[in-house]
Amino acid sequence: MLRRSLLALGALAAAPARAAEPALLRPHVLLDGETLRLSDLFENAPDIALAPAPAPGRRMVLEAANLWNLSRRHNLGWRPLTPHDRAVVERAGRQVPRQDIEAALREELARQGIDPEMEVELPGFVPPMIPAASWFQVAAEAVTVEQPSLRFQATLVVLADGMGAQRMRLAGRASPTVPVVVATRRLALGEVLGPADVRLTRLRAERVRPGQAQQAEQVVGQELRRPMAADQAFALVDLGPPSIVGKNALVTLLLDAPGITLTAQGRALEAAARGATVPVMNLASRSIVEGVAIAPGRVRVAMGAVPVAGR
């Protein structure tokens, strides 16, 4: 048995070495790191660094001639089949979140006496790219502010794993904002607003009309006098106390006089909140009188009130 194994090993040693398989081109390469390697471009190729990777979110193209030169230099056995063979090398990237950049700016602007709730305008600004999965940090330096226009200039510094520090000049303007209450959903006429129907946001001061609600307490519990779209700001003139008498609802008319109270059935011709005056049709006489809504479905009419109309 031992002799047979030794003979088999001798036969393997005597067999000619198998030629290495030619490398196969990868026509599309997506990089995560900072370096482009030969093994990124070709299968069955050694792991040799070739060049820096493209910037995050960018790409480069290696044409057939470039690839053939690499193949010959490293004995890969690959050659282009057509002059149009090429490899597209891309590096995954993502933009720095704009809100992080604005937060860094607000922090520095606040050091110079600017209200941190101001809106930061950066016309034409495009956030820089960083590697897709990298940790990053942003900061604002050398911030200067012009008064009274509140125009500013600053240097944005971006640090991220897998790339060098980026610095870019920023120019913009800080705009004052005020709190505004807006609807969280579409609202119908007559809805009584609850906490879930409203939210507080901030808008640029010049976009806010006088009379718009600026505190949730001004809106919650009120009844809408017109429909509202989602994210629309509430105007105080469009709000009122909840109705206790509905339009066209049947109500009880209370006719009060010293020592006597009479009742009658009526139909409210308008909706009314507690304490509001409402016209009501007396269903017996078909006359219309004005009374005061005092409770749900109840309207008080003074004895001897003169009908305002008749039908």
Image (cartoon, rainbow, N blue to C red):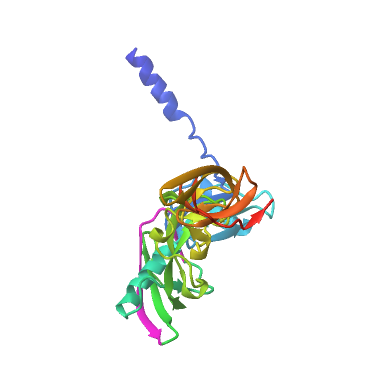
**Residue drawn where x is 38% and y is 72% of the image:** 105
> Which quadrant of the structure image shows residue 140?
bottom left
Left or right position of 59 against 274: right
Q: Main secondary structure of the magenta part?
A: strand
- Residue 104 shows in the view: yes
Residue at the left extreme of this rendering: 111
User: How far across and down, in percent of the image, does residue 162 sit?
Assistant: 38, 59
- Report whether 283 appears left or right of 222: right
Find residue 147 and report its image quarter.
Answer: bottom left
User: With respect to residue 55, does 13 lie above or below?
Assistant: above
User: Is residue 306 found left or right of 165 in the rendered image?
Assistant: right
Q: Where is residue 217 drawn, in percent x and y?
A: 38, 59
Q: Is residue 251 magenta?
A: no
Q: Position of residue 44 (x, y in %)?
A: 50, 43
**Residue 49 appears in view:** no
**Which segment is the magenta one?**
128-147
Q: Can residue 139 be found in the magenta stretch?
A: yes
In the picture shown, does residue 16 fall above or below 261? above
Front residue (pair 10, 223):
223
Seen from this angle, which residue lies furthest bottom?
147
Q: Residue at x 45, y 51 (%)?
A: 257
Q: Specify the quadrant that holds the N terminus.
A: top left
Q: Nearer the viewer, residue 168 or 219?
A: 219
Looking at the image, which residue sits at the far top? 1
Report x, y in % for residue 210: 49, 73
The residue shown at (57%, 45%) is: 266
Instruction: Identify which residue, 189 or 95, lies in the foreground.
Output: 189
Q: Residue at x 36, y 80 (%)?
A: 143
**113 up-or-down from 209: above or below:** below
| Total marks placed | 0
